[in-house]
Image (cartoon, rainbow, N blue to C red):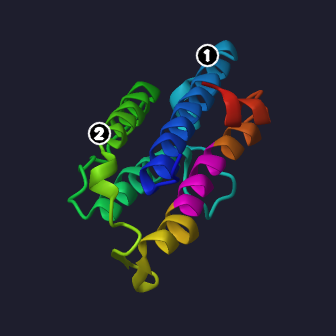
C-alpha cells in the first residue's frame, strides 16, 4: 500500500476526533454523576492564561478540517464558534468527522508539492510545503488541542486514562 497524504491524515484525525468525543462524554457523565452542571466544565482551564475546554475543542476541529482544506487547496467549511453545551460540541465534532471523510484521495493528490500559506495573528504569514505543513504544524497543533482537552478534564477530576485518549472508539 502506498502511503498517501489521504491515508495519513483522514483516518488519523477522524479517529482522534472520535476519541476526543469519547473523552468529553466521560467528562460530561462524571459531572452529572457528581451532581454538578457539565457545562461548568466547558470553561475549565489548565491554568488561567490558557484557553478553556470549549475553545480547545473548537480549535482542534478547526485545525483538522481547515488543514485538510488547505492541503486540498479548497475553501474550508466554516463552523461558528458558538457552542455552549456538550451536545453542541458533539455535533461539531460529528460535522468535522463527516467533512473530513468527504475528502477524496484525488483531492489531496499534489499536496506534497503544494505551498500552504497560513495567516496568523502572532507570527504573520507562515509558509510550508505540504508535507512540512502536515507533519510540522497541522498535526502537532491538532494533537496539542486534543491533549489539552484531555488534560483539562483530568485536572477537573474526570477519571480518564491513556486508553481513553488513544483507543476509545
Q: Which residue is mark 1?
A: 32
Query: Above or below — where is 96 with respect to 31?
Result: below
Q: Residue at x 49, y 63 (%)?
A: 138
Q: Could you tell me if residue 11 is visible in this image?
A: yes
Q: Residue at x 43, y 79 (%)?
A: 128
Question: Mark 2 Cα within 10 Å, few/some/many (few <14, many 20+)?
Answer: few
Report x, y in % for residue 54: 49, 44
Work out how far the residue at label 1 is from the one at label 2, CA to CA, in angstroms: 35 Å
Looking at the rendered structure, the secondary structure element under dot 1 is helix
Looking at the rendered structure, the secondary structure element under dot 2 is loop
Q: Which residue is mark 2?
A: 102
Magenta region includes residue 105: no
* Farthest residue, direction left: 75
- The magenta-colored residue range is 139-149
Report x, y in % for residue 39: 51, 30
Query: Above or below — where is 155 with respect to 126?
Result: above
Amino acid at each position: 500500500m502506498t502511503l498517501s497524504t489521504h491515508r495519513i491524515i483522514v483516518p488519523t484525525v477522524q479517529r482522534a476526533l472520535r476519541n476526543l468525543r469519547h473523552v468529553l462524554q466521560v467528562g460530561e457523565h462524571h459531572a452529572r454523576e457528581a451532581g454538578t452542571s457539565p457545562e461548568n466544565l466547558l470553561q475549565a482551564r489548565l491554568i488561567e492564561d490558557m484557553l478553556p475546554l470549549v475553545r480547545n475543542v473548537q480549535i482542534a476541529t478547526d485545525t483538522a478540517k481547515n488543514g485538510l482544506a488547505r492541503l486540498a487547496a479548497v475553501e474550508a467549511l466554516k463552523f461558528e464558534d458558538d457552542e455552549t453545551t456538550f451536545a453542541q460540541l458533539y455535533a461539531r465534532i460529528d460535522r468535522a468527522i463527516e467533512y473530513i471523510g468527504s475528502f477524496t484521495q484525488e483531492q489531496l493528490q499534489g499536496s506534497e508539492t503544494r505551498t500552504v500559506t497560513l495567516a496568523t495573528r502572532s507570527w504573520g504569514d507562515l509558509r510550508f510545503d505540504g508535507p512540512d505543513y502536515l507533519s510540522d504544524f497541522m498535526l502537532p497543533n491538532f494533537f496539542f488541542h486534543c491533549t489539552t482537552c484531555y488534560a483539562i478534564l483530568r485536572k477537573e477530576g474526570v477519571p480518564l486514562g491513556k486508553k481513553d485518549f488513544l483507543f476509545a472508539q
